[in-house]
Amino acid sequence: MTSLKIRILAGISAFVAIPSAAMADVGKPVNWQMGMQDSASPMQDFVNSFHNWMLVLITVITLFVLALLIYVMVRFNAKANPVPSKTTHNSLIEVVWTLVPVLILAAVAIPSFKLLFYQRVIPAADMTIKVIGNPSWNWTYEYPDLGVNDDKTAKVSFTSYLLPEDKAKADNVPYLLATDTPVVVPVNKTVKLIVTADPEGIIHSWAMPAFGMQINAIPGRLNEDWFKANKEGVFYGQCEELCGKDHAYMPIEVWAVSEENYKAWSDLELKQPKPDELNAFLKTIRPTPAKVASN
Ligand SMILES: [Cu+2]
């Protein structure tokens, strides 16, 4: 097969969300991708199944309308049907063309509301992370569950900056998606996010496609959202609110790691490690992409 054919097939399989070898690299967009990123959370699984159901429904409707149009053009054009019928009323057809759209709307609305409630009703969380979008186009993360100082600030807190292009190339990670300090979470745990922006700042939006979530970071307001990573891996997102000159340069990088590695990371973070020490440690726990969680 030519590489173009392979790309087209990969694109089609992505569009209907069938996992393929070309899409195995979970956590970031890939070249020639047509559909959504591979899922790494139950929420994105739900989004994918809703998307696929809509695709089936809209395809059936489109083909049906096309068939009707072709039938009308062939059967009832002036040549084929010189003496038109004077029918103006048919009760059965009128009932059908009122009822069927109602049923179609119900078939859209029911899974749509289910998904909406699944996303917006925050379940009991195993841990909480506070996310702050800064006016200097970067993200600050606080882990209040790991302990709070006397002045009520979280003991573990860091700001995540864009990894410069030369460093990204040297580390073989995607420039504009990779950060200097990843957000580390345990796999298979429900993580609640409290999301806000600096009160004097601008609106950002914290988004993670593989987790099927996006939530605005609004100055002076607390939003909440949640995710549960069900695969170990490195996952990338970006600010998704047009927020100013460095909008494209405030990426989001989340590592879903095993429980033991998360514990080791949080123990180290509590000791306020020097950047070199932290980076050396991070290299030892960096998950390989899309390792399916064992528990
Ligand atoms: Cu932003």
Image (cartoon, grey):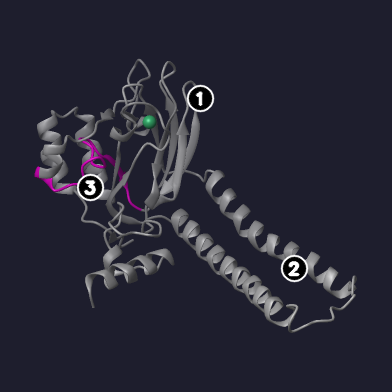
Q: Amino acid at mark 1?
A: Arg
Percent x, y of residue 132: 38, 27
Task: From the image, state whether disc 1 or disc 3 is nearer to you.
Answer: 1
Give neighbour class at mark 2: few <14, some 14-19, many 20+ (Cα, 10 Å).
few
**Alpha carbon distance from label 1 to label 2:** 43 Å
How many labels were placed on the picture?
3
Give neighbour class at mark 1: few <14, some 14-19, many 20+ (Cα, 10 Å).
some
The span picked out in magenta is 170-187
Rendered image quadrant of residue 178: top left
- The residue at which mark 2 appears reads as 100
Task: From the image, state whether disc 3 or disc 2 is nearer to you.
Answer: 2
- Which numbered disc covers residue 172? none
Q: Of the two numbered discs 3 and 2 on the same chain, state the one appearing first in sequence.
A: 2
Position of residue 28 relative to residue 84, above or below, is above
Q: Is mark 1 within 8 Å of ligand 1?
A: no
Figure quadrant, ligand 1: top left
- The residue at which mark 3 appears reads as 261
Rendered image quadrant of residue 66: bottom right
Q: Of the two numbered discs 1 and 2 on the same chain, state the one appearing first in sequence.
A: 2
**In the image, farthest residue toward the bottom:** 80
Give neighbour class at mark 3: few <14, some 14-19, many 20+ (Cα, 10 Å).
some
- The residue at which mark 1 appears reads as 221
Q: Main structural element of the magenta stretch: helix, strand or loop? A: loop
Residue pictured at 56% horizontal, 53% vertical: 115
Q: Is residue 95 left or right of residue 204?
A: right
Percent x, y of residue 177: 26, 42
Considering depth in this image, is 170 or 57 the residue closer to the camera?
57
